[in-house]
Amino acid sequence: MSVEPRRATVLVVDDEVRILSAVQRSLRREGYEILIAETPAEALGILAEREVDLIVSDQKMPGMSGLEFLARAIRMRPQAARLLITGWTEEVPREEMEALGIRTLLPKPWDDGALKQAVREALGR
């Protein structure tokens, strides 16, 4: 009897509900378990309770930037891969991204194919 491989869990963090919906819609058929959070604080609460394989975070959010959030998330779930989505790619310091192990910076609006590919690569699939 074969054992089904565990579905990868993806946490998506963005303060815009329409962006959360769009990412969910884009990844729905990929077979991932998708968790969503509208604030970094909500996402940190999820990370405290759940194993997560990949964190996809917006950069510009009220109260905490995506880079600040991912720096905190690393301490909680160091094994989780990290992607950053932003409409302001030129404002994200490459050195900071590299220091946080952020594999990909996706521009808003993103191409669904590029998003799916970045998620697959981050998850090693």
Image (spheres, grey):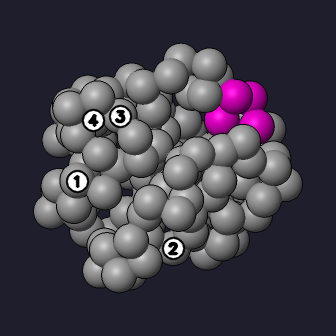
Can you tell which mark lies on residue 87?
none
Between residues 1 and 87, which one lies in front from this camera angle? 87
Q: Amino acid at mark 2?
A: Arg
Examine the rendering and report whether any part of residue 11 can be seen: no
Contact, CB < 8 Å: mark 4 with mark 3? yes
Q: Quadrant of the C terminus?
A: bottom right
Q: Amino acid at mark 1?
A: Glu
Q: Could you tell me how far apart the alpha carbons at marks 4 and 1 are, in whole angstroms?
A: 9 Å
Q: Secondary structure at mark 4?
A: helix
Contact, CB < 8 Å: mark 3 with mark 2? no
Q: Amino acid at mark 4?
A: Pro
Question: What stretch of residues is rendered in magenta?
Answer: 22-26
Q: Secondary structure at mark 1?
A: helix
Q: Which residue is located at x 55 percent, y 59 percent? A: 89
Contact, CB < 8 Å: mark 4 with mark 1? yes
Classified by dominant secondary structure, the portion drawn in magenta counts as helix
